[in-house]
Image (cartoon, grey):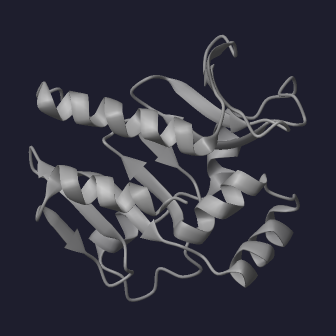
């Protein structure tokens, strides 16, 4: 279901990619840094162990995504969490920096007392100052970090990702790049 993402990314960046020993593939070296990367998926057993460690049952759409990609970073627009590496021993600085951000770390940044229990925080955007949740109805909600108000709603996780990819394509076509210092 999510194999389209790698195909889209390859179409956008063509041969502009680099595969790390961790199997993470980085794409789009623009302005001396990589703008997108995809982490290799998890097995069903790894996902089950991950749920046990986190202490919650993940939404089915998120579990399916994890089976294709253990998180991703798309066009500087989206940082989707996954399962953090168990060890950084022997990894280069580049492999460490480009590793998966643990979904619990993203939740720790954005989770508040008033966050509805059925909201599973799985991603955020430093550019948009938003975070993303999957609700009990499997819809994805874009939430403003400051006001905690829902800005946008997407029917499915796949539809949400398609929208991010389109925005990334538009930004590249219009040479809109974000600078982080």
Q: Is 40 above or below relative to 81?
A: below
> Residue at image x 54%, y 82%?
87
Q: Residue 59: image x %, image y %?
A: 78, 52
Q: Residue 170: image x %, image y %?
A: 23, 28
In the image, taking residue 28 as reference, residue 148 lies left or right, namely: right
Q: Is 125 above or below relative to 128?
A: below
> Residue at image x 30%, y 78%?
92
> Residue at image x 13%, y 59%?
14
- Quarter of the figure with residue 94: bottom left
- Quarter of the figure with residue 130: top right
Q: Residue 164: image x %, image y %?
A: 41, 35
Q: Residue furthest bottom?
A: 90
Q: Quadrant of the C terminus?
A: top left
- Quarter of the figure with residue 152: top right
> Residue at image x 74%, y 83%?
45
Residue 179 visible in the shown view: no
Residue 163 visible in the shown view: yes
Q: Is 179 above or below relative to 93?
A: above
Viewer-proximal residue among 155 and 17: 155
Q: Residue 9: image x %, image y %?
A: 28, 54
Q: Quadrant of the N terminus?
A: bottom right
Viewer-proximal residue among 38 and 131: 38
């Amino acid at each position: 279901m999510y194999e389209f993402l790698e195909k889209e990314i390859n179409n956008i960046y063509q041969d502009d990619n680099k595969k790390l020993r961790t199997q993470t593939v980085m794409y789009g070296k623009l302005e001396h840094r990589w703008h997108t990367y995809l982490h290799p998926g998890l097995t069903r057993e790894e996902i089950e162990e991950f749920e046990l460690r986190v202490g919650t049952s993940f939404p089915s759409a998120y579990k399916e995504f994890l089976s294709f990609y253990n998180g991703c970073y798309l066009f500087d627009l989206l940082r989707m969490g996954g399962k953090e590496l168990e060890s950084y021993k022997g990894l280069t600085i580049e492999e460490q920096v480009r590793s998966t951000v643990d979904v619990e770390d993203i939740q720790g940044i954005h989770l508040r007392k008033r966050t509805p229990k059925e909201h599973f925080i799985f991603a955020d955007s430093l550019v948009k100052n938003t975070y993303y949740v999957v609700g009990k109805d499997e819809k994805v909600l874009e939430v403003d970090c400051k006001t905690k108000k829902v800005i946008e709603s997407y029917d499915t996780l796949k539809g949400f990702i398609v929208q991010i990819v389109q925005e990334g394509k538009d930004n590249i076509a219009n040479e809109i790049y974000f600078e982080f210092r």
